[in-house]
Image: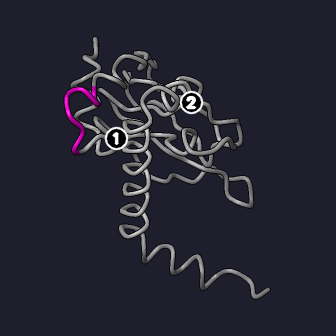
Amino acid sequence: MALVPATTLKACPLFKGFTDTGIQIFAGVAVARAFPKGTALFAEGKTGESLLIVGEGTVRLSARSAAGEDVSLGEVGSGEPLGELALVQKGERLCTATAVTDVSALEIRAADFQKLLATKPQACVKLLMGIVAHFGQKARDNRDMLRTLIRKAPAA
């Protein structure tokens, strides 16, 4: 499963509208990673240090409920980003990502993104705008579920 970084990045919605030059900037820092079936790409509660983009394979997202049960949040596949918040802010992973099949992915580390921010700020701002747009779309797609969470929340 050898990934072509530029092709994998072009398939990802975060890089929508990027020029070939912009794609090459991030392809230059992206690291190919392989995750055998059943292994964790990252774990809930651990510090997020990178954005992953699935090149091939399927990844299951899950989180622990208040009762400690493993709750499935769905699956993602080729072209989908994971852990993009790690490029925006330092913090804990909100869920666990586990390889359902053998997975090949590209990793863009937050440290490399920070270095690029100094030398290629326009490309980095464009990626950050892509992350914001992607999150906004996720929120719209999950509006009904978000409403039920808000209704269930105890009054302050």
Residue 18 on the magenta span: yes
Quick check: can you spot residue 39?
no
Per the image, the residue denoted by label 1 is 80
Q: Are marks 2 and 1 in contact (CB under 8 Å)?
A: no
Q: Please give left or right for residue 19 compared with residue 127 in the image.
A: left
Q: Please give left or right for residue 37 compared with residue 87 in the image.
A: left
Q: Which residue appears at 29% of the width and 39% of the height?
A: 12
Residue type (three-letter) at the residue carrying disc 1? Glu
Per the image, the residue denoted by label 2 is 114
Indicate the quadrant containing the C terminus: top left, top right, bottom left or bottom right.
bottom right
Q: Which residues are magenta?
A: 17-23
Residue 112 image point, x, y percent: 53, 23
Q: Earlier in the sequence, mark 2 or mark 1?
A: 1
Residue 130 image point, x, y percent: 36, 49
Residue 92 image point, x, y percent: 69, 43
Q: Which residue appears at 39% of the width and 24% of the height?
A: 105
Q: How is the image coloured?
A: one colour
Indicate the quadrant containing the N terminus: top left, top right, bottom left or bottom right.
top left
Residue furthest right as drawn: 156
The quarter of the picture where residue 29 lies is: top left
